Amino acid sequence: MSAEPNTPDRSRPDACPGALAVHQAADGALSRVRLPGGFLAPGQLQSLAEAADDLGNGELELTSRGNVQFRAVTDPQALAGRLATAGLLPSPTHERVRNIVATPLSGRIGGLVDVRDWVRGLDRGLCADPALADLPGRVLFSLDDGRGDVSGLSADLGLHAVSADRVALVLAGRDSGVRIDAADGVGALLAAARALLEIRDRQWRLHEIDGGPERVLDRLGLRPEQDPVTLSAPDAGPVGWLDHGDGAVTLAAGVRFGTLPTRTAQFLAAVEKPIVVTPWKSVLLCDLDEWTAEQVVRVLAPMGLIFDANSPWLEVSACTGRPGCAKSLADVRTDASAAVDSGELPAQGRQHWSGCERRCGRPRGEVTDVVATGEGYRVEQGHG
């Protein structure tokens, strides 16, 4: 079995970092914590913040899969122990394969179904199957409640609600045309994950396998029965005051460069309400009453959280840059921050600042690239 033309040759094992298998960056060890569905209890966020203060650089980095990572970790073993105590490391053998993105507002605002139980069931099923510990750490699962916000994130395996009791099976980021009962969805995803293991060679992602989706369906004994629905994800998640319609409120906050200072994280945790980390590197503070929501905005907006959907900060992303990355030619985050503060951004609309030609962390869609050259920046109008 061969990779499709122009796909990467995965001749080395997947080295995606986790909570136990850390990556050595220029500023020290990098540890990534999987948060299925982006779910965090207040006490867990408090534990993460304390760990980042004691063992890292005092910041929590949000990722495009709704996970959290630590930089400059001084004692990875001690960090792993704290994560386990906080309930964030339920299976040491499976910790890197718990990559599950889900509709962040599901069960609260909109959607055809509530996918939160799907998230928990899929996570339990992954951890309970010893064979699935061998999935590459890059494999991604998506659970979309029908509004179409995460099905377009190019997950390897996913469910997309098409009614209250039927779902489309998503393979390699596309609707396979298969429809199954929603009650059977999690079981189908677990079976598809086992099929992926059986058909892969050195490839890390389903789309890298020649005929991968068709081969998965064949092993599951499934056939397309509907014309596929086109799946595309929004460029950004919700920001601002989100009314549930029953008196409750969720606050959606943008985070500059997806980096959450621990002091801000501790204030969020102190509200003692559920938190969701989104694939757009933002956070949701859920199930508030209106009075509490008003106080949160008054306190946290001055601390840097973004509740204004028109803020220029929401248009600007950046890689780690110096000093965290040895390949970077500039301290891109400092330079990008100065450009935002001065109102002198090099382009209108979405833009991604990169310290080198690798352009790490570049978001999907129409984005202008601002690339460090060692003698300034080169601006390129880019595409997805």
Image (spheres, grey):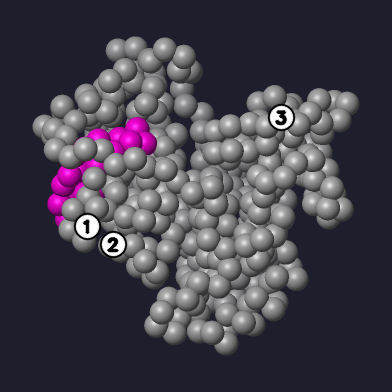
Badge 3: how crowded within 10 Å, few (<14), some, or many (20+)? Answer: few
Q: Alpha carbon of mark 3 to alpha carbon of mark 2: how far?
A: 40 Å
Describe residue 251's horizontal placement relative to residue 331 as left or right: left
Q: Residue furthest left?
A: 221
Q: Is residue 90 visible?
A: no
Instruction: Look at the image and tell me whether residue 376 can be seen.
Output: yes
Q: Is residue 171 magenta?
A: yes
Q: Specify the amino acid type for callout 2.
A: Leu
Quadrant in which residue 223 is drawn: top left
Q: In this view of the protein, which residue sits in the foreground, 345 or 96?
A: 345
Q: Which residue is mark 2?
A: 112
Marks 2 and 1 sit apart, C-alpha to C-alpha, by 6 Å
In the depicted view, which residue is nearer to us: 35 or 31?
A: 35
The residue at which mark 1 appears reads as 163
Q: Position of residue 225 (x, y in %)?
A: 14, 38
Name of the residue lying farthest toward the bottom: 291
Tell me where the magenta segment starts and ends, as one range.
169-188
* Numbered circle sitting on residue 380: 3
Would you say the residues marked 3 and 1 are in contact, meaning their CB atoms lie under 8 Å apart? no
Residue 122's spot in the image, x, y percent? Answer: 29, 50
- Residue at (34% x, 51% y) in the render: 143
Mark sitting earlier along the chain (3/1): 1
At 46% from the left edge and 14% from the top edge, which residue is drawn?
6
Mark in front: 3 vs 2: 3
The reply to whether discs 2 and 1 touch (Cβ–Cβ < 8 Å) is: yes
84 to the left or right of 158: right
- What is the three-letter code of the residue carrying label 3? Glu
What's the residue type where badge 1 is placed? Ser
